[in-house]
Image (cartoon, coloured by chain):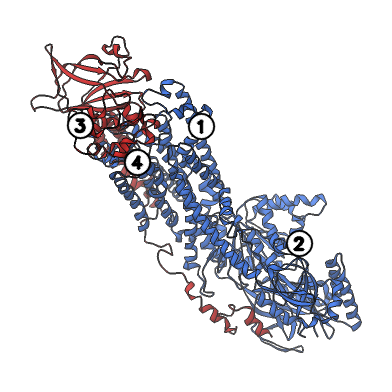
């Protein structure tokens, strides 16, 4: 009858109902584990920091940030302004330029075309001077160019030395001999020679240019390694390879000093670090301050002797020589200082304005509270 | 001997229980045929169809997966990278794609394996087939069309069948079709006439079974034809993602086109195309220009393809999957009584819970407890409460009586089969009993008898009780024979059988004597009124769909505050149809409630040919959209689904339906979000639903807290992903203008690959799982907050544009900031210079810090996990960069990153620039927060002032 029906049809229905079938109890007990755990995580009640960015908290921060940024900006700006920088464009596109004769020079012209540019430094360069060469419209960051190198060859790997990576094409082999160093970057290495003279009463005093210490330490000592083998004779180690097409000399004749020759030649390493933008500068030489009494470069007349080997006219490029002192923040760059001052001022200004607005409402707020 | 004939009246059908059908049918078959000849009650089995076999899994699954546009796109990108010489290695996009495809394949394979297993249970089950006059046992999957199948009581039908004969004398069987249409009412089926004789005369009566003839098997069955995957539900967020995706795809194509065009413009100058220092290889020179342009275009596509990140799909899937656990973990949605908490059947719709505009709810079992409590009965106008003994010759009634479901009701020893709304003929020594709602009984009885009972019935209905009237009639043997004959004729009729039978019943059930009426209370669920009020306050419109009598339903609606006393009610029932035109123009700011009954609804939705009624549809829609609450009473189960289809086709709001019974399944499947109540009517509803909760009150937390949070989280996740990839790729795009459009990547390949996978993935995942911009308690207690995110507010074009502009602005800041920084000859105090990889690394460092800090600014709920992943990711980035640049990797062709990061950090200028750029990038965001804050305060103050002035 009916009792049967109730128990049968509704096994869970009877739970908790007096007089109803107690049959359902068993079914209910088995699922006790289904009760969710009462943990903070599962109940989404983890202790949490709930920051509320209100005008009251943010505006003083604006104020403070402004107060911090403006002095930093001024500091950078002043530092940047104190940096001495002198730049000469020696491309020679203008007919009046002494280097005009060398404009259409080719790679293998011997003897190299030389030209001399005289210039005057208005102010003396007190601290160490860094000599850069700068190229314009030279796409060192072109993809085809950037990847055209073999880092394991440059790292001294002997198998890569004789069998350079395919990425180096079309500068991988020349006359069936592997090129060392292979690739477009190495092939187009900057090879102008720049010499600086101080002209004092018509006497040209050469200024000592230091060519070591211009590359990253890690590059010079880890990333770039000469091939290894018996002995230290680089000529023997580079046996079986050929020089890059455009180079006048093979890589083991880049410099007379053994620790600056071959792949670890610093000029070469500097060149191999591809520039970010088509207009770039690369460190060329260092001019160290000799003593504390004299500035590194006094104000006066100077002449720059250029062995003009590097053609840039064909791609509408420019070449420059830059003399610069360096501060804690690097070379001359007004951008950072101005940016800091601007952002700091805006911050400060907005902080003040908004604080006033906020306070006005805040005060009204409290005054409105009183009648309530 | 009793024999029963059950007839269904349109409009009288209502919610029927979703009991475990096997159990239910057993009890019924015994109750219905006490003399031992069983009328088997049968249930049609669900047939699940696995998609894959072991052999075709891989190709078919891959095919299915790559039909998704996003996957196909990533596949194309990957193939392009493999075939064409592209700036980034195929690994950068192949690895994430492989990961996504594998995870999805495993998930789908597992689900299919489950389906296989379930299918085997059905397909391998034993079925008796009559072959050569012998009973043969067969596996159900081997049934062929034409086989004669014998099905016993309580078994499920293995396929579509023609009913040939049954063991009962009159050749009937009772079938529930719960798994087809959700109706668990028993339907009487009659054997094909020619075979009835055969089976009653011949020996089949020893078999308590029906003999049937297989018509359709396998995938041709009605079941299989009706079967639709539930996965078709797509949330509004997903639609927005697709729209944004198209925008970004356009941006991507635009960028690639611009770059390709400019590249060839730039290269038209021969010294740009091939300067002496950078010659092309022979192969490059010999390629056709058109082909070269095409590969260039593809290369740019590959270079910028990170703007549409694979990882977003992974993160969204993970967020949905992991996030849905919080619903089932919620102890506030745990019901002590049934010992169960909420159930999540799909995680695809979490955010849709925060977008609901229409709530369609069943009444019985959903709004009410569905525990029927006998309140009183009236016999001949006398009221009886609780224990009744020896009244008018009736023996006794157990009291207080409690019955669940709209099930049989035992009354005074006479069996009154209380199949809800159905009118039964009871032929006991030629007494005909008839029970039903007052509206169907009163027309059949003598008018003078009605009044005393009607008073009780009306009062009971006003109190919200469910009422049922019982009438009887004496029949002479002659009359009985006549009726029997007429019924048999009607039964055998080939055309209009239903109508003919209805006519016979109508004729028979005239001039009856009213015995009385019963009142049964179905208590409202706890906190029902609060929940409904909260839903209203949250801007949702609540529709109650019920099979109940209008008065009963109305009083329930008042009790649960669906209708307030201030609500003006518009009654649209069969009696008042036509009034709608007049009332329509009066719909203004007042709250309106609409009451409509099933028959009117079918008049409106299925207009007959005459042209006049077709425009009711649009009028009806307008009215519906303006009413805050709608009550549809006297609804058939199928009508419930019809309402949805109509409403969603016409207006397209996001609908949620909630129900507890098998008859609600159709509307649960039809709505955007289907919620099942784990009630007393079985599991049908909760199994077919997207989410199941124990009680209606849990809807409040589910929608207002969980839904709101999930929506905010996922909306922010989506916007953030697009944003962070825009400002990731924009500098790379800008860089093309400075590298001769040569597709030179700005960032190292490791950074390109890891950006989305490692450096910026976990903070947003943690955010999208843990964020509570407003605390759960506030969300639950202040329903109006729900309206803040309604209408997909956070994924409209406005916020999308804001994020896009923010991304673009930051991309510009990153790139040009570092660009101007690099105008300097040297950034180090030793005069040494940086190269292009340092440039990219500075941009990337600013990028990673900015997007992470931007998320930190947006985070309003900092748990230790947020701290851990946000600061952890930044630390990991720094650590990784040191590590990546600290070793000469033998497997890499180029050691481009060697000590780049470390060198970068030795420069004070770089530090200052990085700090400045991060600050500039975040500045607009901070400013906006402050301005909003001030504006809000201003608003508050003004409100306060106004109030002060008024007071």
For label 2, the SS is: helix
Q: Looking at the image, which is closer to me, B222 or A69?
A: B222
Dot label at residue A260: 3
Q: Looking at the image, which is closer to me, A227 or B128?
A: A227
Q: CA distance from mark 2 to mark 3?
A: 99 Å
For disc 2, the neighbor class at 10 Å (few under 14, some 14 to 19, many from 20) is some
Q: Earlier in the sequence, mark 2 or mark 1?
A: 1
Task: Answer with the quarter of the image where residue B462 lies.
Answer: bottom right
Q: Chain letter for mark 1, please.
A: B
Image marks 3 and 4: residues in contact by CB distance under 8 Å: no
In the image, A5: left or right of B859? right
Q: CA distance from mark 3 to mark 4?
A: 36 Å
Where residue B12 sits: x, y (%)? 75, 68
Q: Which residue is mark 4?
A: B846
Dot label at residue B599: 2
In the image, A262: left or right of A277? left
- In the rendered image, the vertical position of residue B227 relative to residue A290, given as above or below: below
Task: Answer with the quarter of the image where residue B25 lies.
Answer: bottom right
Frontmost of labels 3 and 4 is: 3
Q: Chain letter for mark 3, please.
A: A
- In the rendered image, the vertical position of residue B504 relative to residue A173, given as above or below: below
Frontmost of labels 2 and 1 is: 1
Q: Earlier in the sequence, mark 4 or mark 2?
A: 2
Q: Which chain is blue?
A: B
Q: Which chain is red?
A: A
For label 1, the SS is: helix
Q: Looking at the image, which is closer to me, B709 or B913?
A: B913
Frontmost of labels 4 and 2 is: 4
């Amino acid at each position: 009858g009916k009792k049967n029906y109730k128990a049968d049809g509704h096994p869970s229905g009877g739970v908790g109902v007096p007089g109803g079938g107690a049959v359902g109890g068993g079914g209910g007990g088995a699922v006790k584990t289904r009760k969710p755990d009462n943990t903070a995580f599962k109940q989404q009640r983890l202790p949490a920091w709930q920051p509320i960015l209100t005008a009251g908290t943010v505006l003083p921060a604006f104020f403070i940030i402004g107060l911090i940024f403006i002095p930093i900006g001024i500091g950078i700006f002043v530092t940047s302004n104190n940096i001495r920088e002198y730049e000469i464009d020696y491309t020679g596109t203008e007919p009046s330029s002494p280097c005009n004769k060398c404009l259409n020079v080719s790679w293998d012209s011997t003897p190299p075309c030389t030209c001399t540019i005289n210039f005057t430094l208005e102010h003396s360069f007190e601290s160490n001077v860094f000599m850069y060469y700068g190229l314009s419209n030279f796409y060192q960051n072109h993809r085809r160019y950037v990847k055209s190198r073999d880092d394991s060859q440059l790292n001294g790997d002997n198998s890569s030395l004789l069998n350079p990576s395919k990425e180096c094409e079309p500068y991988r082999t020349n006359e069936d001999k592997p090129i060392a160093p292979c690739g477009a970057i190495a092939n187009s290495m900057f090879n102008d020679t720049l010499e600086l003279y101080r002209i004092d009463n018509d006497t040209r005093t050469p200024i000592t240019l230091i060519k070591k210490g211009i590359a990253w330490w890690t590059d010079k000592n880890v990333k770039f390694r000469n091939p290894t083998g018996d002995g230290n004779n680089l000529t023997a180690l580079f046996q079986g390879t050929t020089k890059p097409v455009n180079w006048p000399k093979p890589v083991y004749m880049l410099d007379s000093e053994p620790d600056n020759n071959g792949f670890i030649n610093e000029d070469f390493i500097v060149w191999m670090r591809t520039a970010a933008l088509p207009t770039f500068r690369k460190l060329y030489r260092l001019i160290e301050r000799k003593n504390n009494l004299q500035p590194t470069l006094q104000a006066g007349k100077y002449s720059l002797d250029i062995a003009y080997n590097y053609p840039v006219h064909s791609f509408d490029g420019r070449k420059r020589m830059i003399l610069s002192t360096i501060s804690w923040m690097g070379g001359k760059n007004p951008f950072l200082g101005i940016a800091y001052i601007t952002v700091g001022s805006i911050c400060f200004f907005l902080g003040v304005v908004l604080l006033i607005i906020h306070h006005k409402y805040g005060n009204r707020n409290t005054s409105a509270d009183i009648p309530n | 001997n009793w024999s029963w004939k059950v007839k269904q009246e349109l409009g009288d059908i209502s919610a029927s229980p979703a009991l475990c059908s096997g159990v239910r049918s057993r009890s019924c078959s015994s109750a219905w045929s006490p003399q031992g000849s069983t009328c088997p009650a049968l249930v049609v089995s669900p047939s699940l169809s696995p998609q894959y076999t072991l052999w075709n899994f891989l190709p078919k699954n891959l095919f299915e997966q790559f039909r998704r546009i996003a996957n196909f796109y990533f596949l194309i990108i990957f193939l392009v990278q493999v075939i064409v010489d592209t700036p980034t290695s195929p690994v950068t996009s192949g690895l994430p794609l492989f990961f996504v495809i594998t995870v999805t394949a495993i998930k789908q394979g597992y689900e299919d394996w489950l389906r296989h297993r379930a299918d085997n249970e059905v397909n391998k089950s034993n079925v008796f087939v009559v072959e050569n006059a012998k009973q043969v046992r067969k596996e159900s999957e081997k049934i062929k069309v034409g086989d004669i199948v014998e099905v016993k009581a309580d078994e499920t039908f293995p396929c579509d069948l023609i009913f040939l004969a049954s063991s009962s004398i009159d050749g009937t069987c009772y079938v529930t079709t719960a798994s087809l249409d959700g109706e668990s009412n028993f339907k009487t089926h009659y054997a094909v006439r020619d075979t009835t004789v055969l089976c009653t005369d011949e020996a089949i009566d020893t078999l308590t079974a029906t003999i049937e003839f297989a018509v359709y098997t396998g995938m041709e069955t009605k079941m299989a034809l009706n079967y639709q995957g539930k996965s078709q539900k797509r949330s509004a967020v997903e639609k927005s993602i697709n729209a944004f995706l198209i925008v970004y795809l356009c941006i991507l194509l635009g960028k690639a086109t611009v770059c390709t065009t400019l590249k060839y413009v730039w290269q038209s100058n021969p010294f740009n195309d091939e300067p002496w220092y950078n010659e092309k290889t022979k192969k490059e020179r010999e390629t056709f220009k058109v082909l070269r342009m095409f590969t260039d275009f593809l290369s740019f596509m590959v270079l910028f393809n990170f703007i549409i990140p694979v990882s977003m799909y992974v993160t969204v899937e993970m967020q949905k999957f992991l996030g849905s656990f919080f619903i089932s973990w919620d102890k506030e949605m745990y019901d002590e009584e049934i010992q169960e908490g909420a159930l999540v059947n799909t995680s695809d719709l979490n955010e849709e819970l925060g977008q609901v505009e229409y709530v369609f709810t069943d009444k019985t079992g959903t709004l009410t407890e569905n525990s029927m409590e006998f309140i009183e009965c009236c016999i001949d106008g006398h009221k009886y409460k609780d224990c009744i003994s020896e009244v008018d010759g009736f023996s006794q009634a157990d009291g207080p009586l409690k019955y669940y479901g709209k099930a049989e009701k035992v009354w005074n020893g006479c069996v009154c089969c209380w199949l809800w709304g159905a009118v039964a003929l009871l032929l006991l020594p030629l007494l005909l009993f008839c029970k039903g709602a007052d509206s169907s009984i009163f027309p059949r009885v003598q008018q003078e008898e009605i009044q005393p009972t009607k008073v009780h019935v009306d009062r009971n209905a006003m109190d919200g009780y469910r009422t049922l009237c019982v009438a009887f009639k004496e029949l002479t043997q002659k009359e009985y024979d006549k009726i029997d004959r007429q019924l048999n004729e009607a039964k055998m009729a080939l055309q209009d059988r239903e109508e003919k039978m209805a006519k016979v019943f109508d004729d028979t059930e005239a001039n009856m004597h009213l015995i009385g009426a019963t009142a049964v209370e179905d208590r409202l669920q706890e906190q029902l009124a609060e929940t409904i009020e909260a839903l209203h306050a949250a801007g949702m419109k609540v529709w109650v769909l019920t099979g109940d009598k209008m008065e009963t339903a109305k009083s329930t609606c008042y009790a649960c505050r669906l209708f307030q006393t201030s609500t003006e009610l518009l009654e649209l029932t069969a009696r008042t149809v036509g009034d709608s035109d007049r009332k329509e123009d009066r719909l203004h700011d007042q709250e309106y409630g609409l009451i409509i009954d099933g028959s009117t609804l079918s008049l409106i939705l299925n207009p007959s040919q005459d042209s006049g009624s077709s425009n009711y549809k649009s009028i009806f829609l307008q009215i519906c959209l303006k009413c805050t609450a709608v009550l549809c009473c006297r609804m058939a189960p199928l009508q419930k689904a019809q309402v949805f289809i109509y409403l969603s086709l016409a207006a397209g709001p996001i609908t949620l339906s909630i129900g507890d019974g098998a008859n609600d399944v159709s509307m649960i499947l039809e709505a955007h979000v289907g919620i099942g109540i784990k009630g007393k009517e079985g599991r049908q509803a909760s199994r077919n639903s997207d989410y199941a909760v124990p009680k209606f009150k849990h809807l409040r937390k589910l929608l207002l807290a969980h839904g709101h949070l999930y929506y905010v989280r996922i909306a922010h996740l989506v916007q953030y992903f697009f944003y962070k990839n825009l400002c990731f790729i924009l500098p790379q795009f800008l860089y093309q203008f400075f590298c001769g459009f040569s597709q030179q990547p700005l960032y190292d390949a490791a950074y390109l690959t890891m950006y989305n996978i490692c450096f910026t993935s976990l903070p947003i995942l943690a955010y999208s799982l843990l964020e509570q911009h407003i605390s759960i308690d506030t969300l639950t207690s202040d329903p109006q907050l729900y309206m803040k995110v309604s209408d997909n507010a956070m994924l409209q074009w406005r916020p999308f544009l804001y994020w896009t502009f923010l991304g673009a602005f930051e991309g510009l800041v990153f790139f040009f900031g570092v660009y101007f920084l690099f105008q300097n000859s040297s950034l180090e105090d030793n005069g040494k210079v940086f190269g292009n990889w340092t440039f990219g690394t500075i941009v990337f460092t600013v990028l990673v810090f900015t997007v992470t800090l931007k998320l930190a600014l947006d985070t309003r709920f900092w748990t230790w996990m947020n701290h851990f992943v946000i600061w952890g990711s930044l630390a990991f980035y720094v650590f990784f960069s040191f590590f990546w640049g600290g070793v000469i990797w033998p497997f890499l062709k180029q050691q481009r990153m060697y000590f780049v990061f470390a060198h970068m950090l030795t420069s004070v200028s770089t530090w200052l620039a990085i700090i400045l750029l991060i600050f500039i990038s975040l500045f607009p965001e901070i400013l906006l927060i402050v301005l909003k804050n001030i504006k809000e305060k201003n608003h508050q103050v003004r409100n306060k002032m106004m109030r002060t002035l008024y007071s």
